[in-house]
Image (cartoon, rainbow, N blue to C red):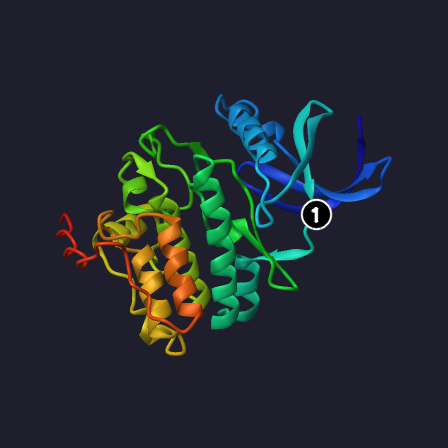
Amino acid sequence: MPSYTLIGKIGEGGMGVVYRALQLPLERPVAVKFLPASLMARPEALPRFMREVQICTRLSHPNIIKILDCGEMNGQPFYAMELLEAQTIRQLLKERGRIPVAQAVEIFHQVLEALEYCHREGLIHRDIKPHNIMVDGHNHATLMDFGLVKILDASGLTHSRQILGSPHYMSPEMLRGETVGSQADLFSLGTVVFEMLCGQKAFPGKNIRDIGRSILYGEPPGLSSLAPDCPPGLVKVIEGCMKRALEHRYQTTGEVLRDLNRFEAGGAPRGRTGETGDRPAPESPR
């Protein structure tokens, strides 16, 4: 069984602490994620951590993080994963303000490919956000953090009354605690691409209540006005991901990829199959 020498902390999140480490005896650089002792008392923490390990080890895709090993070190559960010399989209936005159109499109395409693979495997990620997408110096994108992943049932839906994830990037159906499908990931990815291009969140707010009202009853600022260099065809694809009503949002990752491919080839995106336009936003409760 391999052992590890920890070198230094890389980062810390709500469900784990990540260290740079060497895997011995290979002396292979890896990243090691621990479930902190402070979370062990929560009944859902360890099962969620282990589910992430079990699911990620069965996935094999160039744009999804690779899990190499798992175990326990000094009483703390951990897993080792490939070490990425990369930055999160959040870090890129903090440094640059916004991401150029060509680079954003390339990242968009790669994450869609990763999500299409996940959805074919019967999984939805449920936590697509700038912190969970890493981009290296060659603009290779990697989707990570599968701690909230859910397995779809035979209907293509997953059932949960819990509101989990990052509010700014949640789909309306997730915020309402409803049954969700793969379209929830598309909505979240649309908000991330919007933010890459504009340098600001599609649905701002000071707290979860304000953010929720913005997502459920408001409209994001016009993408074309905030990012005038964003071509109309690309705007249509992103807005198609961010439709509030499920029946007007893209139905599958394949539909989005089809339209993004058409845009990249110089053609016009067709929109969602059978699209007739979005319905008006419901009146906000007083």
Image coords of residue 199 (percent x, y):
44, 67
As rendered, which of 104 and 261 lies closer to the eye?
A: 261
Q: Quick check: 223 above or below 21?
A: below
Total tally of numbered discs in the picture:
1
Q: Quick check: 4 above or below 97?
A: above
The residue that appears at 39% across and 50% down in the rendered structure is 253
As rendered, which of 135 and 130 lies closer to the eye?
A: 135
Quickly name the residue at label 1.
83
Image coords of residue 162 (percent x, y):
35, 31
**In the visual, does 180 lie left or right of 69?**
left
Can residue 183 be seen in this snapshot? yes
In the rendered image, which quarter is residue 234 located in?
Answer: bottom left
The residue that appears at 27% across and 35% down in the rendered structure is 178
As rendered, which of 134 and 165 lies closer to the eye?
A: 134
In the rendered image, which quarter is residue 221 located in?
Answer: bottom left
Q: Quick check: 284 above or below 228?
A: above
Image coords of residue 72 (percent x, y):
70, 25
Q: What element carries label 1?
A: loop
The residue that appears at 43% across and 63% down in the rendered structure is 261
Can residue 125 be seen in this snapshot? no
The residue that appears at 30% across and 52% down in the rendered structure is 250
Quadrant (top left, top right, bottom left, bottom right) of the N terminus = top right
Three-letter amino acid code at the position of disc 1: Leu
**In the visual, does 1 lie left or right of 152?**
right
